Amino acid sequence: MRELFGTDGIRGKARQYPLDRETMYKLGIALAHRLKKMIEKPRVLIGRDTRESGPEIAGALSAGLRSGGAEPIIAGIIPTPGVAYLCRTTDALAAISISASHNPFEDNGVKIFGHDGMKLADAVEEEIEDDLRSVVASSVPDFRDLDDENFELIEEYERFLMDAIPTNALMGKKVVLDAGYGAAYRIAPAVFRRAGADVVVIHDTPNGRNINEQSGALHPERLAQVVVEQSADFGVAFDGDADRAIFADDAGKIRDGDEIIYLWAKYLRAQGKLRGDVIVTTVMSNFGFEKQLHADGIELLRAQVGDKYVLELMLARDAVLGGEQSGHIIDRLVHTTGDGIHTALVFGHILGTMHAPFSRLHAFDPMPQLLLNQKVAAKPPLDSLPRFQAAHAKSLEALQGRGRILVRYSGTENLVRVMVEGEDESQIRAIAEELRDVLSDEIR
């Protein structure tokens, strides 16, 4: 059973178990021992976002890797997809991204990639947990926090980003970028300017504690406002590790991942590049999105939440485009993971081919959808909660087959998420609030 790894690596409070010095040191040893079964001196790439706890975790992991016989390579502050890309294009046998993505600065996390640039399968994560439990370390040696930067590796990632679009693809475009005080704060403005764009950047002065603070992909309201104020063509907000992107059009309307994937899929299909006329999203994607795709002759497959599960289904069906409503979009023509900056550049190029303002590009008519989050102290199986099961059955009956209810625990936080879709907004709000309140009362 996995105890440390959730749907997106290990996540928790910085400097507390499992992100304490000792556990991170042991994780480094366990990973090194596993990799040494393949080659004598494995190299492991390590990148991080802008959280103040990142250098300490990098130091503990590096000390453990060295103790286990591996060689750590420190990339510095770089988006998680940059770590994934560099892992598969260098001689690194594995890579680690130190980030808690969209979470506040007090949290941090560890995502591990194999040499293929893909997040580890659940079974492999379980094996690493077993190895970690068997590590005997009487004490953690002294080590220094690692805030080093490898600008050669960062430049290599920037070249990859630029290779995805034609030279000067964004010439004449004005773009607002919201870095969310995270890992995109230097790289995103640099590559957009290299692509010819007139760039306005906000929330690009990280201090270790302001990552995602009223900014970025979870809080795109300021982005939308600045796009209108600056008469920009579009804006993009990134999360802490820049693996997701949320857009604002020229009229200041927020356009989520479902809409971007739809317009991207239509573009690929017109180019004859939408392999199999199929895309992959998750159970969270809007039903209106699915209906419109079906009408267009494009099949939508749904994976469980988590971009690595989206990728697994994409590989199984040889799909080239997939992602999540939250802005994780995987372009399998060139990448193995969601990459917010790549998404922003490529979609910006697509917009330039459409000869119409972004605000005039209609995607689909979304079905009203409401998502409520409730903090919980535990995560008991939902089918073990009789009051919730009764309320759920009653709610399904009320929707009369013209809506959806999805209730699940977050894989990275102590939250239960209640999502309800339906034709009547007041009805879905009443259902979502009732289910949330029942869960809050029943889970003690």
Image (tube, grey):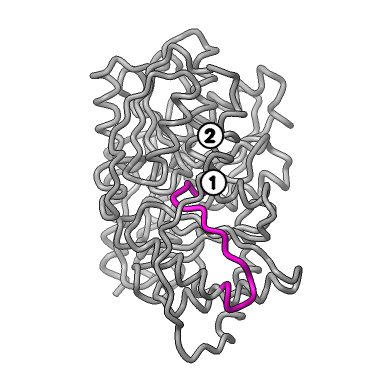
* Residue type at the position of mark 2: His
Q: Is residue 412 magenta?
A: no
User: Helix or strand or loop: what does disc 1 sit on?
Assistant: helix
291 with respect to 428 (left or right): right
- Location of the C terminus by quadrant is bottom left
* Residue type at the position of mark 1: Pro
User: Helix or strand or loop: what does disc 2 sit on?
Assistant: helix
| For residue 185, above or below residue 16 | above
Chain-order first, disc 2 or disc 1: 1
Which residue in the structure is indicated by mark 2? 342
Which residue in the structure is indicated by mark 1? 81
Residue drawn at 42 percent across, 30 percent down: 366
Residue drawn at 74 percent across, 74 percent down: 37
Q: Give the alpha-carbon distance from disc 2 to disc 1, as whole Å.
A: 9 Å
| For residue 157, above or below residue 303 | above
Instruction: Say which quarter of the image contains residue 107.
Output: bottom left
Q: Position of residue 17 (x, y in %)?
A: 39, 76
| For residue 103, above or below residue 200 | below
Q: Is residue 68 magenta?
A: yes
Farthest residue to the bottom: give it.
138
Instruction: Say which quarter of the image contains residue 216.
Output: top left
Q: Residues within 10 Å of mark 1 (few under 14, many from 20)?
A: many
**Whether label 2 touches label 1, CB < 8 Å:** yes
Magenta range is 65-81
Farthest residue to the top: give it.
355
| For residue 251, above or below residue 140 | above
